[in-house]
Amino acid sequence: MMTSVDTELIRVLADPLRLRIVTLLARETLCTTHLVEETGARQTNLSNHLRVLREAGVVETEPCGRFTYYRLRPDVIAQLAGHFAELAESARNAAENKRACP
């Protein structure tokens, strides 16, 4: 059974811009300037989304001079993927289970 933490993470990742950010960070560690260039989002909007991702534990930061780099935390994504894999396996195993109607 999925927990409230998982549903919050799903909500965080359901936003199209945040999912785009996560997809970009899956390929390389990027600073805010790179993410603005890649997404076309305004700096303030992007910063708000990065804060949400950071607070959810999806990304971590690395200060570098006056820039902040963002890195995806693959363990968080893998844990969420594991929950979905468990659901899929459960559904496969339960395919023949049918509760009788009263």
Image (cartoon, rainbow, N blue to C red):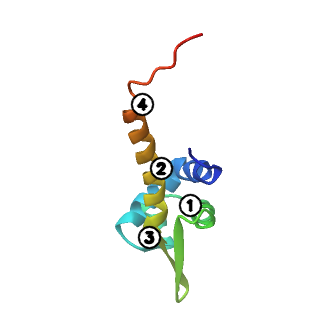
Amino acid, disc 4 = Ala
- Amino acid tagged 1: Arg
| Earlier sequence position, callout 4 versus callout 3 | 3
CA distance separating discs 3 and 2: 32 Å
- Element marked by disc 4: loop
Q: How far is the residue under mark 4 from the one under mark 2? A: 16 Å
Q: Is residue 96 left or right of residue 9?
A: left
Earlier residue among tags 3 and 2: 3
In this view, the residue in front, 34 or 87, is 87
Label 4 Cα crowd, 10 Å radius (few <14 / some 14-19 / many 20+): few
Locate residue 53 relative to residue 77 in the image: left or right: right
Circle nearer the viewer, 1 or 2: 2
Q: State the SS at label 2.
A: helix
Report, in whole angstroms, how far the alpha carbon at label 4 lies from the one at label 3.
46 Å
Q: Nearer the viewer, residue 64 or 2?
A: 2
Can you identify the residue that label 1 sits on?
Answer: 42
Q: Earlier in the sequence, mark 1 or mark 3?
A: 3
Residues marked 4 and 2 touching at CB (< 8 Å): no
Image quadrant where residue 49 sits: bottom right
Q: Return the x and y of residue 36 as percentages of the image width and height.
A: 49, 65
Identify the amino acid type marked 2.
His
Q: Which residue is mark 3?
A: 34
Q: Which mark is residue 83?
A: 2
**Residue 86: x percent and y percent?**
43, 46
